[in-house]
Image: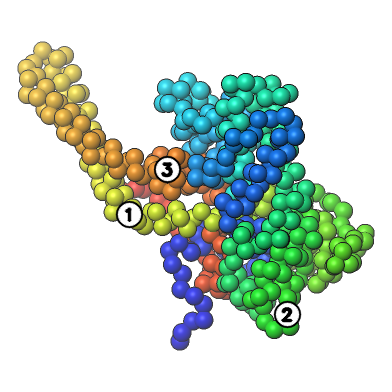
Amino acid sequence: MTSSTPDCPPTRGVFCNRTLNLRGVKAIGYDMDYTLIHYFVKEWERAAFEHCCAHLKTLGWPVEGLYFDPESFTLGLTFDLELGNVVKATRFGYVVRAQHGNEMLSFAELRRSYTATVLDLEDQRFRFMNTLFELSRASLWCQLIDLHDREPLPRIKTYRQLYQTIDAALISAHQGGALKEDIVANPQRFVDLDPDVVPTLMDQRLAGKELILITNSDWSYSQKIMNWCFNRFMPKNQTWRDLFDLIIVAANKPRFFSDAGPIYKVVDFGRGLLAPHHGVIESGAVYHGGNARLVEDALGHEGSQFLYVGDHLFGDVYVTKDVLRWRTALIVRELEDEISASITTAAANTKLASLMAEKSQLERTHSLLRLQRRQLVVRNEPRQDTDREIEQTSAELATLDERIAPLARAASEQGNQVWGPLMRAGVDKSLFARQVEKHADVYTSRVSNFRAETPYAYLRAARVLLPHETPRP
């Protein structure tokens, strides 16, 4: 029997940290921006960057020469508000790479700054780059750090104040309406359409799942952008609203998942007029604000029967998992490029692993020879032969290092030439990978990837080998 679901290429897989039985999921909540709707990142973030610069110019900041540089940054980096750096850390919080202004720190500078520092995301010194919205922030931050170091910016005394001013400017760009007006006026420039999203949601509805839209965007923007993105793919006489049992805009996540915020009902869809709402929320209606407990009460499901899908590590999956115990799925669009790069470099990575195993064995031999020489010295016995063997293994190690160096350098630049792979920091997992592992039950590059899995899938986490279970070379 042939399947109506699409084949799933490696880049479009759904990856499982904790086993998830989709048959047991009764309701699926979706974020909108960068989840149900994807944007051309460079266009969106360039527009945000330009709006932010316009705001900073009103403060008297010299922003005329600033430029948007998305290729120089990636998800999962961290702002150090004390030292004015952007850093990449391992899953244990050890910094492996750092940039101050537009310059990467040397190895000596890195050690001097971070040898005694373990990056803790609960420390107010650090701010984590959770989403693609952070690319414009990073580009602004690094260039403005350079300007500030040369000549202090108006009313800025610390790097923390610099970050806070950029943050206020970006909030103004995103929430002030001008940026979203640009997007609605020219959606072809900004929106990356995915025709498979609507069939995916329809499959889920036909399987008995209740679908919820929970977005921080307001009703005016949400209806316009959803009309443009979804209605063209809907069956005749249906609109995108027919896909959802509940629609909640201006949700104010992450507080939506943790606090009992007030709720209003949208009573005029054209003008977005609101009316206070009391009691149980109704299926098929559109609400402004509210909180997750109202959603649970309205649908009558336990927390473990909800799956929430979003792109923000903290605002979408961390709080949802921590407070409500909903199941979680993280959307990471960069996965597609990362997986493609790993496939392209598979042969080189296999060669690197082989050479590293050879080096490990040779280093062990070298260490044993040094121990043997020390014992010979203690016993005052001849050690010329051992010295020659040590010299030979040292030369072999040097030759191996020459072969390993270009392969290791290429592996460290995989995905992003400056910061390397999203999910790795050197040979270890990155701090971003650890956050994904800890808070997301599953992760994937886009919502439509769930279609190949079907709403009835049993997604099993792979058995992970522990260090002591890994075969020794």
Q: Quadrant of the N terminus?
A: bottom left
Q: Are marks 3 and 1 in contact (CB under 8 Å)?
A: no
Q: Which residue is mark 1?
A: 346
Query: Residue 305, percent across and down?
Result: 68, 65
Contact between labelled residues 3 and 2, with CB atoms less than 8 Å apart = no
Residue nearer the viewer, 443 or 163: 163
Give amino acid for label 2.
Gln
Q: Residue at x 74, y 56 (%)?
A: 181
Say which label, 2 or 3, has the lower sequence index: 2
SS under mark 2: loop
Nearer-N-terminus badge (3/1): 1
- Direction from residue 285 to residue 419 in the image, left or right: left
Q: Which amino acid, mark 3?
A: Gln
| x then y, percent, for residue 344 | 35, 56
Residue at image position (34%, 48%) is: 470
Task: Locate residue 136, reporting x and y percent.
Answer: 61, 43
How far, Cα to Cα, is label 1 from label 2?
Answer: 46 Å
Query: Is residue 45 shown to the viewer in this render?
Result: yes
Crowd tier of the residue under label 2, counting other residues whose Cα lies within 10 Å: few below 14, some 14–19, many 20 or above: few
Question: Compared with residue 65, is residue 472 higher up or lower down, i.e. above or below?
Answer: below
Q: Classify 10 Å Cα crowding around label 1: few (below 14), some (14-19), many (20 and above).
A: few
Residue wearing tag 2? 238
Q: Which residue is mark 3?
A: 417
Nearest the camera: 224 or 246?
A: 224
Instruction: Using the image, determine if residue 390 lies above or below residue 195.
Output: above
Q: Residue furthest front?
A: 64
Check disc 1 and report its element: helix, strand or loop. helix
